[in-house]
Image: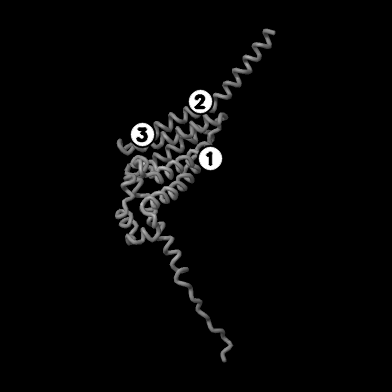
């Protein structure tokens, strides 16, 4: 008998081999949905268009998403939402001040719009323009993504008053969504850049306001001391 060991080929279960392929197929479907929604809103998430863009059989949609189109749209928004949160964080981080950070964010978004040839905007924003009264699940998913983005923006605004800080963060996101609409219509990044400049000035004023109020209070205090 030979002393050399025989190599034993380990049999891999079929379902284990299928997992990476299944994950890849599912990811392609979601990416196709995101691309379509960024271009055409909810209409861009038509099932036939998704399977064509993902190069997947139509039956795979019902296999991976048995709950149908709403499930695909909501999960696609979730994937897109996480990417946007990371993008916002990266765009805001490292700026020397909050006004510079806000301006940098809108300039980064403007560049994304330019690179898309003015054909793609925010997937969640575009879908939100298409929803009807029956799209309860999709509306809830979109609102949740918006709130999560506001959370990230708010974390970079050194405005002492919590309610005002939240309002300004929401206004930043609202300005981005509106500038996307105008930018696509006008085929220009000017609306996004203008919004960035205005928001930077607003944030600068909001950050400076408490310091101004403190200075005023100290002056008033000194004036009272002199009078006494």
- From the image, tell me which residue sits under label 1: 94
Comparing 71 with 224, the one in front is: 71
Q: How many marks?
A: 3
Q: Position of residue 89 (x, y in %)?
A: 50, 42
Is residue 114 something that shows in the picture?
no
Q: For the view shown, which residue lies furthest in the front direction?
A: 134
Label 2 residue SS? helix
Closer to us: 111 or 208? 208
Which element carries disc 3, helix, strand or loop? helix
Instruction: Report the residue that reaches farthest toward the right.
Output: 228
Position of the C terminus by quadrant: top right
The label on residue 190 is: 3
Residue 67 lies, with reference to residue 104, above or below; the image says below
* Disc 2: which residue: 205
Q: Residues within 10 Å of mark 2 (few under 14, many from 20)?
A: some
Left or right, 215 with respect to 88, comes to right
N-term mark: 2 or 1: 1
Q: Is residue 207 above or below residue 132?
A: above
Q: Residue furthest top?
A: 227
Q: Using the numbered discs, state the Cα–Cα distance from disc 2 to disc 1 in whole angstroms.
A: 20 Å
Q: Earlier in the sequence, mark 1 or mark 3?
A: 1
User: Could you say where residue 73 lies in the image, as x and y percent from the top left?
Assistant: 38, 49
Q: Residues within 10 Å of mark 1 (few under 14, many from 20)?
A: few
Q: Which mark is residue 119?
A: none
Which residue occupies 41% across, 57% down? 27
Whole-angstrom CA distance, mark 3 to mark 2, is: 23 Å
- Picture coordinates of residue 137, whole percent (x, y): 41, 46
């Amino acid at each position: 008998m030979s002393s050399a060991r025989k190599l034993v080929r380990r049999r891999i279960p079929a379902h284990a081999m299928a997992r990476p392929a299944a994950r890849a197929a599912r990811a392609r479907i979601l990416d196709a949905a995101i691309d379509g929604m960024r271009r055409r809103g909810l209409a861009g998430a038509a099932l036939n268009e998704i399977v064509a863009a993902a190069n997947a059989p139509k039956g795979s949609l019902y296999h991976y998403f048995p709950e149908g189109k709403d499930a695909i749209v909501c999960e696609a928004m979730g994937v897109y939402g996480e990417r946007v949160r990371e993008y916002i964080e990266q765009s805001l981080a490292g700026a020397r001040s909050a006004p510079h950070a806000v301006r940098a964010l809108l300039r980064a978004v403007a560049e994304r719009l330019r690179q898309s040839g003015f054909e793609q905007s925010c997937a969640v924003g575009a879908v939100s323009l298409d929803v009807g009264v029956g799209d309860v699940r999709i509306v809830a998913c979109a609102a949740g993504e918006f709130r999560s983005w506001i959370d990230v923006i708010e974390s970079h605004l050194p405005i002492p008053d919590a309610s005002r800080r939240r309002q300004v963060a929401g206004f930043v996101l609202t300005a981005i969504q509106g500038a996307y609409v105008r930018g696509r219509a006008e085929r220009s990044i000017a609306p996004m850049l203008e919004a960035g400049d205005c928001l930077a000035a607003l944030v600068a004023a909001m950050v400076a306001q408490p310091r101004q109020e403190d200075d005023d209070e100290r002056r008033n205090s000194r004036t009272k001391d002199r009078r006494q």
